[in-house]
Amino acid sequence: MIERDWGTYEILAQGEKWLTKRLVFEVAAEMKPQVHRERNETWLVVAGYGTLFVEGLAHVLSTGEGLKVMRGQWHHFYAGPFGAVVIETWFGELDEEDIER
């Protein structure tokens, strides 16, 4: 598990041009706004709920709901009052440095 200020994550599986992570958000934690230039992402909430902001639009996601974030779109996540578990899958270049905040 890798710790961040919003919670933890771990890599579940990886292929040549895809990678899947499990993100565990603490109660009311917020991931800072970010953008990626070389990959698309799919976010799927598997426990709890939260709000995924994409290009300034708020999308409230409950368990079982997800959303695609395309390269070049600013996004951030705010976990609900019980926290959230998200499965995030990257498609494209698998570079942790492909991030702007």
Image (cartoon, rainbow, N blue to C red):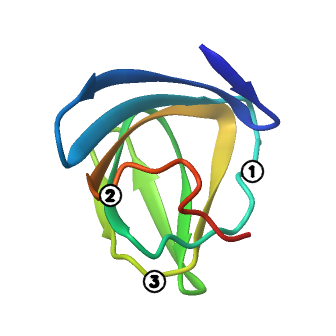
Kindly check if marks 3 and 2 are in contact, taking CB atoms under 8 A apart as contact.
no
Q: Mark 1 or 2 closer to N-term?
A: 1
Q: Mark 3 or 2 closer to N-term?
A: 3
Characterize the local packing of mark 2: few (<14), some (14-19) or many (20 or more) Cα atoms within 10 angstroms.
some
Q: Secondary structure at mark 3?
A: loop
Q: Which residue is mark 1?
A: 30
Position in image of residue 97 (x %, y %): 59, 55
- Compute the Cα span from label 1 to label 2: 25 Å
Amino acid, disc 1:
Glu
Asked whether, in this view, residue 76 is left or right of residue 41, the answer is: right
Q: Which residue is mark 2?
A: 93
Relative to 44, residue 1 above or below: above
Characterize the local packing of mark 3: few (<14), some (14-19) or many (20 or more) Cα atoms within 10 angstroms.
some
Q: Nearer the viewer, residue 20 or 81?
A: 20
Asked whether, in this view, residue 36 is left or right of residue 13, the answer is: right
Q: Residue at x 65, y 45 (%)?
A: 79
Q: Which residue is mark 3?
A: 72
Q: Secondary structure at mark 2?
A: loop
Q: Tell me the quarter of the picture where residue 93 sits.
A: bottom left
Relative to 59, residue 98 above or below: above
Q: Nearer the viewer, residue 32 or 57?
A: 32
Position in image of residue 16 (x %, y %): 17, 41
Amino acid, disc 3:
Gly
Q: Residue at x 41, y 24 (%)?
A: 11
Judged by depth in the image, the label closer to the viewer, 1 or 2, is: 2
Q: Mark 1 or 3 closer to N-term?
A: 1
Judged by depth in the image, the label closer to the viewer, 3 or 2, is: 2
In the image, farthest residue toward the right? 5
- Compute the Cα span from label 1 to label 3: 20 Å
Kindly check if marks 1 and 3 are in contact, taking CB atoms under 8 A apart as contact.
no
Asked whether, in this view, residue 73 is left or right of residue 63, the answer is: right
